[in-house]
Image (cartoon, rainbow, N blue to C red):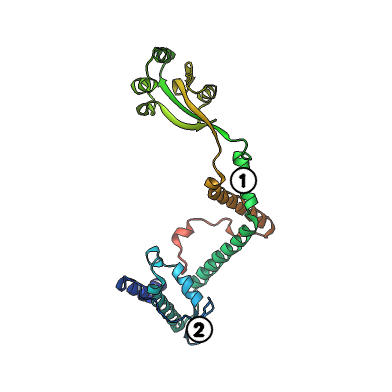
Amino acid sequence: MLHRLATAAFVAAALPVLAIAQDQTEAPAASTETAAPVDPATVLAKVGDTEITLGHLVAARSGLPEQFAQMPASVLFDGLLDQIVNQELLKQAYTGEEPDSVKVTIDNSRRSLMAAASLAEYLEANVTEEAVQKAYNDAYGDGYEPEMEYHASHVLVETEEEASDIIAQYEDGAEFAKLARDNSTGPSAPNGGDLGWMTAGMTVEPFDMAMQALEPGEISGPVQSNFGWHVIKMNETREQAPAFEDVQAELRAKVQEDVTMAYIDVLNESGNVDKSGAEGIDPAVLDSMTPQE
């Protein structure tokens, strides 16, 4: 019952934002008056002794559904302020003790927000440009050892005899791509056997070793793998490491993940964590219990 009432109150309090968003499709004209300087602590309204600040509006906007949060601030401002005022009025009108469901929800929200702030502060200090550059060097070398890439095609058949026949036809002048389209049982057959660009280790070992031994323009002898018999043609090779700028965001995310996990491990070791209270608890209680209980 409490949950239903709380939901109804929230929806009612949110109506100003929804109404303004629906009724006003264009932002009001900007005021020509010089705006007074403001900051998040600027008080916009009071409900009794409770102050509603600009910071409250900024936080409320960040929690809106995406289709509303992206609307112009001039459209949302009054609706957000009314919403927070209405919520404060409803809060002050409540005469009972603070429900346990509210307490645990506030605890979880505060914990989540403070954890995010704590981690952001730690990452800012520990995920440096030097750390990202080191991750690039570890993955791709120091810029002077680019990785070899291979552009190969192949014909896949069932027997060694068929593979030898493909080689003979190629040596007699047949086009390799046509031989692949007409004979190969592999998924690359419609593309003339073209496998695209690969690096060492991306294919099964017998194929991989035979491919790496070829020079551009050469074809292999019959090569057996667990898929069958291959005839491989090396189209071209290149030495290439991705530019640092092209992988910087990906590497930064990986460094952040590694730093985060290491930091959490340290905190767990030094944080006096005791999970013994969870021993013997049936996880199914999560399905049967609500925060109101």
**In the displayed structure, does residue 69 sit left or right of residue 135?**
left
Callout 1 secondary element = helix
Nearer to us: label 2 or label 1: 1
Residue 5 visible, this angle: no
Near mark 1 (Cα within 10 A), the count class, few <14, some 14-19 or many ≥20, is: some
Amino acid type at image mark 1: Ala
x, y (%) of residue 177? 38, 23
Q: Which residue is mark 1?
A: 135
* Callout 2 crowding tier (Cα within 10 Å): few <14, some 14–19, many ≥20: few
Residue 245 location (% of width, % of height): 54, 47
Which amino acid type corresponds to the residue marked 2 in the rendered image? Thr
Q: Farthest residue toward the left?
A: 23
Query: Distance of mark 2 from mark 1, alpha carbons?
Result: 50 Å
State the residue lying farthest toward the right. 270
Q: Is residue 109 left or right of residue 89?
A: right
Residue at image position (38%, 14%) is 173
Q: Which of 94/259 is in front?
A: 259
Query: Residue 118 at what x, y percent from top left?
Result: 61, 63
Q: Earlier in the sequence, mark 2 or mark 1?
A: 2
The mark tally for this picture is 2
Q: Which residue is mark 2?
A: 50
Q: Is residue 209 visible?
A: yes
Tell me the quarter of the image containing the N terminus.
bottom left
SS at mark 2?
strand
Would you identify the image quadrant in which residue 81 lies? bottom left
Q: Is residue 58 left or right of residue 123?
A: left
Residue 189 is marked as none
Q: Nearer the viewer, residue 164 or 234?
A: 234
Depth check: give the residue in front, 250 or 16.
Answer: 250
Place of residue 219 in the rendered image (x, y in percent of width and height, measured from the top left): 47, 19
